[in-house]
Image (cartoon, rainbow, N blue to C red):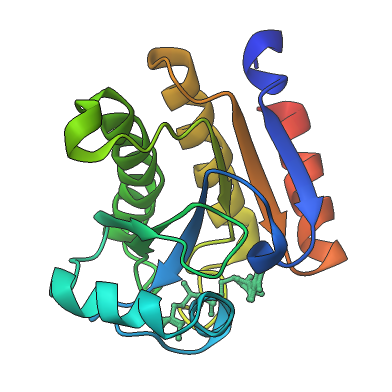
């Protein structure tokens, strides 16, 4: 991996709701109306204003992404994406790649919109391990997809200065740190 890309990527252990970044990514479900895991934690920390904003969006298909404000979170925005439920079929990989790419596209598209419309100016973004909890995606496979997709995006597009992969467990941090070495 190119040094200039590697410099923008950080792997960290912790709770995504505590991060002070321009946007955190939520591993949501297609209703966007909250749930368990990281989704539940984000809604609890953001407060009821987040759910009110999500209700107006009207859902999100698997692999796509939608943006809201962060409400009571330290993060200014939440980018909600819906990961695939792991099935072992080739479409899983394609859908998980889409989650990472579309989340980043959502972030940079907001950067270029006229200020009067919606100028979010997202330069730092944090991802949890999308689909690796309730949705059952094996962490090693998902981690390779996550890092490769983000690195390719950073190589191709301008605008994002920092990507944090934030993992709940030390074991997952080790998987990410090992994987990034050989990519
Ligand atoms: N900070 C960082 N990572 C977290 C946090 C946190 N606060 N909480 C959990 N994780 P999951 P999914 C990790 O199940 O598999 C929800 O009900 C967790 O250890 O949250 O995409 C939604 O509404 C795991 O590694 O998301 C959907 O219905 C990773 O985040 C469904 O779960 C993702 O686990 C989505 O399932």
Q: How many tags in the picture?
A: 0
Q: Residue at x 57, y 55 (%)?
A: 75
Q: Quarter-wise, where is residue 168 in the image?
A: bottom right
Position of 181 compared to 154: left or right? right
Determine the residue positioned at 69% across, 21% down: 6
Please state if 177 lies on the left or on the right of 152 as rendered: right
Image spot of residue 129 (x, y percent): 58, 61
| Quarter of the figure with the C terminus | top right
Q: Which quadrant of the picture is home to ligand 1? A: bottom right
Say above or below: 161 vs 41: above
152 w.r.t. 138: above or below: above
Q: Residue 41, relative to residue 12: is it above or below?
A: below
Q: Please report the residue visible at 66 percent of the width from the left and 48 percent of the height from the top.
A: 165
The answer to which of 179 and 75 lies nearer the viewer is 75
Q: Position of residue 104 (x, y in %)?
A: 39, 38
Residue at horizontal 66 percent and vertical 43 percent from the top: 164
Which quadrant would residue 120 be assigned to in this image? top left
Residue furthest out toward the bottom: 36
Q: Is residue 2 visible?
A: no
Residue nearer the viewer, 166 or 17: 17
In terms of depth relative to the viewer, which is nearer, 110 or 64?
Answer: 110
**Rendering coords of residue 32 (x, y %):** 28, 77
Say which of 67 and 83 sits in front: 67
Residue 181, quarter of the rendered image: top right
Whether residue 183 is visible here, answered yes or no, is yes
Whole-percent x, y for residue 85 in the image: 37, 75
Quarter of the figure with the N terminus: top right
The extreme front residue here reads 116
């Amino acid at each position: 991996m190119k040094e200039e890309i590697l410099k923008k990527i950080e792997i960290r252990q912790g709770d995504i709701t505590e991060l002070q970044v321009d946007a955190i990514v939520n591993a949501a479900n297609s209703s966007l109306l909250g749930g368990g895991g990281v989704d539940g934690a984000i809604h609890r920390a953001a407060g009821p204003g987040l759910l009110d904003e999500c209700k107006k969006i009207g859902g999100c298909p698997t692999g796509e992404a939608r943006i809201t404000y962060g409400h009571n979170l330290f993060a200014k925005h939440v980018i909600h994406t819906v990961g695939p439920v792991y099935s072992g079929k080739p479409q899983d990989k394609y859908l998980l790649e889409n989650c990472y790419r579309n989340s980043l596209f959502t972030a940079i598209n907001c950067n270029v919109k006229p200020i009067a419309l919606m100028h979010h100016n997202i330069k730092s973004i944090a991802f949890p391990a999308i689909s690796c909890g309730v949705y059952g995606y094996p962490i090693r496979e998902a981690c390779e997809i996550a890092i490769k997709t983000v690195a390719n995006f950073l190589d191709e597009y301008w605008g994002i200065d920092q990507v944090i992969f934030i993992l709940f467990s030390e074991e997952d941090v080790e998987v990410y740190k090992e994987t990034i070495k050989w990519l």
